[in-house]
Amino acid sequence: MNHSTISYKHFDDAGFTGKKCSIFHINIPHCTRSTTAEVYNTSARSPVYYNQANDPQIVEFTVEFIPFLGGKELIGKADDLVKDVLKDKYEPAPCTICKYDKDDKIELQGTVNDVFIQKVELFLNRSRNINGRNAENSQKEFIRVRFTLIGVEPKLERK
Amino acid sequence: MADQLLSPNKLKFDLGGKSINITDYEINFAISNGCGYDPSTSSTKGIPHYAIQKGSLRQDYSITVWIIQVPDKKNNDDIKAIKSAYDNTRINDPKKYVTNILFMFTSNDDTIYTKIGFEGYVKDVEDYIDKTGNLSGIKAKIVVFDPMTLKIT
């Protein structure tokens, strides 16, 4: 089965592992490196000077988990993960995202350095059918925990 | 053994110490710390260097509960309790209308897995008739009054 994994120290410490929750959604950070050029050409006859610089290698990406019954404490821990970032001694950690193919081999591996958590969103809705409000017909929703992470210098390997 | 998903089946809603039965709910929280990377160049090494800029916590939320009126009017007390809580917000003194609000999410076996508690009040109450025109009820929005009291455990 195609699947993705995330390996990140702060998630592992808090219990966001395969035993207690499942990954519902993950996106590969935007990994292109572009160059910004600035051209000075005040007069057509004069030599053309230019400067160029790399765009900041700062990426944001989101990971969404669905906790299992065995991971019922995860919701309470989720907001602590956000608050811990404000501590003086907080250390960002590298994050690895792998996408596996059907043969269980790594197809795509993305690494981002110095990742920390920026935001957590908790979705505790009973039903997905918002307009109808008909509890019988509405689709059952499950609890989701979505994290927004930020890191620098992403690398992407296609294997 | 297959894992069971944590599904929001049962919710106990407590408004100022009074338990209220609700029909449906939507509770969403977003907590962000306002931290980000500030791109700056290290002068000593000449390589790109990124520094973390720390911010402060921000809580965003949307809490809506629905109560559908049942024909035998058994839950009229619940509807009245929410409506009177809303009416109290017209008083100038927050002590009169800000109460302890507690949401307890339990599994089907009544094991509490998440508690969300805060000091808040009922901000908005709307009477509605659903799309089919058969059921009527109220829709209430609840807000946090004191952000320091918000505890998600």
Image: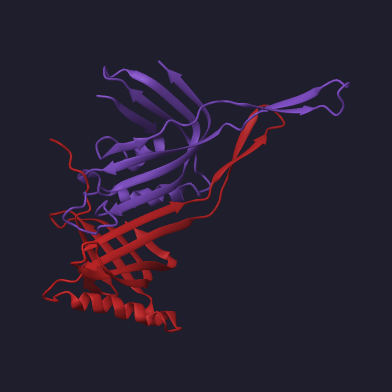
Chain colours: A purple, B red
Image quadrant in which you'd find residue A28: top left
Residue A27: percent from left, percent from top: 41, 33
Determine whether, in the image, residue B10 is placed left or right of residue B61. Answer: left
Determine whether, in the image, residue B39 is placed left or right of residue A13. Answer: right
The quarter of the rendered structure image containing the N terminus of chain B is top left
Nearer-the-camera pick, A108 or B87? B87
The quarter of the rendered structure image containing the C terminus of chain B is bottom left
The structure residue drawn at horizontal position 48% and vertical position 56%, both measured from the top left corner, is B58
In the depicted structure, whether residue A18 falls above or below residue B70: above
In the depicted structure, whether residue A108 falls above or below residue B147: above
Nearer-the-camera pick, B90 or A10? B90
The structure residue drawn at horizontal position 25% and vertical position 40%, both measured from the top left corner, is A20
The structure residue drawn at horizontal position 57% and vertical position 31%, both measured from the top left corner, is A57
How many numbered circles does the render carry?
0
Nearer-the-camera pick, A153 or B9? B9
The structure residue drawn at horizontal position 26% and vertical position 65%, both measured from the top left corner, is B66
Image quadrant in which you'd find residue B120: bottom left
Residue B2: percent from left, percent from top: 15, 36
Residue B68: percent from left, percent from top: 21, 68
Nearer-the-camera pick, B41 or A13? B41
